[in-house]
Image (cartoon, rainbow, N blue to C red):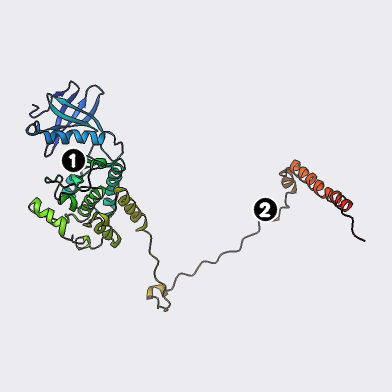
Amino acid sequence: MLQNGEGRLLNNRYQLLERFGTGGMANIYRARDVLLNRNVAIKVLRDDHEHNPDFEAQFRNEAQSVANLSHPNIVTVYDFGFDNGQPFIVMELVPGTDLKSLLRKRGRFTVEEGIPLIVQACAGIGYAHRAGVIHCDVKPHNMLVTPDKRLKVTDFGIARALATINPDERADVVWGSPQYFSPEQAAGLAPSPASDVYSLGVVLYEILTGTLPFTGSTAEELARQHLNADPVPPSEYVPDIPKALEEIILKVLAKEPSARYRTADQLMRVLMKFGTQRDIPTASPLNLTPEVAPASVWEAAPAPKPVAPPQPTQQMFEPFDWSALLSDIDWGSVALGLLALVAVFGLIPFWMWVYFTYNPPVK
């Protein structure tokens, strides 16, 4: 048993320094890899879940899901092991804090601040989708943000491999976070990459408005809202949110997976395109009715200063330096060109003689 855990040496290699996070099934420590002499983060299954096969399976699943995912926006997993029968995962130590903590501190982000964060989250989740992995628990708690605004997705504990999902499956136990899971997950149906896209939409809604699209006191109430209720348009909380961005958010929060973007990569491309186009001024419609300019336009402007004609200088009257021009000419190329010209035109009489020799004119 690790109890508090601080100061313990796991597998004679990882020294636990301090606990800096805790979750539903694990504690997270800052630790030192004494073999490689580097700082790491270690997630240790909590004592009260140590002999629970479901939690142990999730723990191992997280390590296996991320082991083959190498992406700048996904936290790297270094190792997985057991210490006295207790499983632990060794991960990259990311400086900074999780996005949910930043939201609690700041309230919300501006569009200029929020979109780049979600684009990075989409990049990491999209890479996992291409590798055949669905995260299934996308939420701001699982997004780590560094001081220089780099974002990394973590906690693939309930991730699913696409190859193992039966489209007709139904689950009695729903895994995930009720505030962020998709309608199909709320109904116990099979998840898909579009399920992660929905959750990304909930996170995007929250960081731009400072509130969740659905709130409730119980998981059942939240599930019903995800299944049946329409979210309040973000513009009711943030009136100046761009209309195009609001349409993207509401599309992502569609109840039917087929009505959303299919993968996180697609959502990322849409958000990046929005980011590049929103600053381009829209062309104003053609107005054929003459308008009277405001008074300020007709105020007298200062008279332009007369421009003096250019004064002749000595350089204007200097003779052209033909010798400099002639020295720049490649006379060898000129001679070859002339020879070629003479050869071509010199052959014309010869070919005419040959032609008329074999085709004499008819008299």
- Percent coordinates x, y for residue 148 in the rendering: 28, 42
Q: Secondary structure at mark 1?
A: loop
**Split into 4 quadrants, where in the image is the N terminus?**
top left
- Percent coordinates x, y for residue 195 in the rendering: 23, 49
Q: Is residue 232 visible?
A: yes
Q: Residues within 10 Å of mark 1 (few under 14, many from 20)?
A: some
In the image, 327 versus 43, the foreground residue is 43
Circle 1 sits on which residue?
Answer: 158
- Percent coordinates x, y for residue 122 in the rendering: 28, 47
C-alpha distance separating marks 1 and 2: 81 Å
Residue with the most extreme right position: 363
Q: Residue at x 66, y 58 (%)?
A: 312
**Split into 4 quadrants, where in the image is the C terminus?**
bottom right
Q: Nearer the viewer, mark 1 or mark 2?
A: 1
Location of residue 62 by image quarter: top left
Circle 2 sits on which residue?
Answer: 315
Q: Residue at x 52, y 66 (%)?
A: 305
In the image, 278 versus 269, the foreground residue is 269
Q: Residues within 10 Å of mark 2 (few under 14, many from 20)?
A: few
